Amino acid sequence: MGENKTVPAQKNGKKANWFLRFLKWVFPWKGDRPKMVVIKCVFLICVAAFAVSGWLLADYYIKDFAANDEYMKAQSLMNGNSNFVSSTEEKEQLPLPEGYREQFNALYQINQRLCGWLKINGTGIDYPVVHPTDNDYYLHHTFYDSYSSAGAPFLDYRCNFSQDNMSGNTIIYGHNLNSGRMFHDVINYKNVSYYKEHPLISYNTVYADHDWKIIGMFFTNADMSLEDSFAYHMFIDKQNDEEFYALLNEAIQRSFFTTGVDVNAEDKLLMLSTCDNAFDNSRLVLLARMVRPGESSEVDVSAARQNASQYLPQNYIDKLGGTYRPWDEDYTFYRP
């Protein structure tokens, strides 16, 4: 009986000794040489940095997947799937504002900032669009108002989406997520062959359906203090035709491709703005014009070409390559 009582004590002692040796091996300890103290401190900093990075990465993907689940539900609601309607029907139904179409009712019950639906067939872009009171909130909140780095596609707060007074230039912002979601597929338009396969945008407002023919996609710096930046986001409504064509030709001079789609000063423009993740503080902007009343939505892409004389900022060329050329003040692709 005496021997049996000593066995647990010996095991506990071995565990205590092992744990103490581990602590002495990992953490700075009395008697350690200065060099060893430095090594241990560096090791602990690296472990902490790895743990924090791992947690942030896991948190990013968890929230991204959660946001994706929300948007899949929104897509189902838009497609009339009743499986997701019950949660909204439990609440008192809000009356639709005058002119809002019934097909948007289920989504309107979730978010009254709803202003339309954006889709490009054959891509991952298929989302509700909201109209906020500023251009910050939906950078970090989903359509369901959940906090998430996925954000939500949102209309520039200065734009008007009413049927009778729609802004001359509709600007929709969205993130370029590494997961491939949101506006990630916009980067594929750097190649004209991708444009030829996806030349049309569907952006339907809560008032009416509209197709938009893509006419270009350009890169610019978002830092307006740089000489080669382009303040495209400041153009909402034209002051005159000259201003319209100046904006249009600057966009096409910067575009990765040109098309045979005609544009005139009476056309409504659409810009899908996102980040180019290859750079800090940069933007890729997909540019389109609204299909006119009575015009076919079919697009003849035979005249589309990669833009051999594309203007690119120097930082783009330094990082991704290309041939620099000076800015051409007289460049004209579209004219009155």
Image: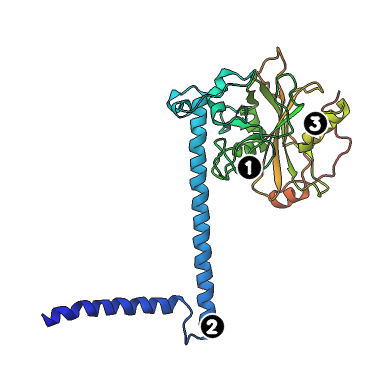
Q: Earlier in the sequence, mark 2 or mark 1?
A: 2
Q: Secondary structure at mark 1?
A: helix
Q: Quadrant of residue 136?
A: top right
Label 1 crowd (10 A; few <14 / some 14-19 / many >=20): some
Label 3 crowd (10 A; few <14 / some 14-19 / many >=20): many
Residue 162: assigned label = none
How far apart in space, not on screen, are marks 2 and 1 (Cα)?
47 Å
How far apart in space, not on screen, are marks 3 and 2 (Cα)?
63 Å
Q: Position of residue 211 (x, y in %)?
A: 66, 21
Q: Quadrant of the N terminus?
A: bottom left
How far apart in space, not on screen, are marks 1 and 3 (Cα)?
27 Å
Residue where numbered disc 2 is placed: 35
Q: Residue furthest bottom?
A: 31
Residue 248: assigned label = 3
Residue drawn at x 55%, y 22% as measured from the top left? 105
Above/below status of 293 relative to 75: above
Q: Residue furthest left?
A: 1
Residue 309 appears in the picture as rendered: no
Residue where numbered disc 1 is placed: 139
Of marks 1 and 3, the one in the foreground: 1
Nearest the viewer among 19 and 291 is 19
Nearest the viewer among 221 and 173 is 173
Q: Earlier in the sequence, mark 1 or mark 3?
A: 1
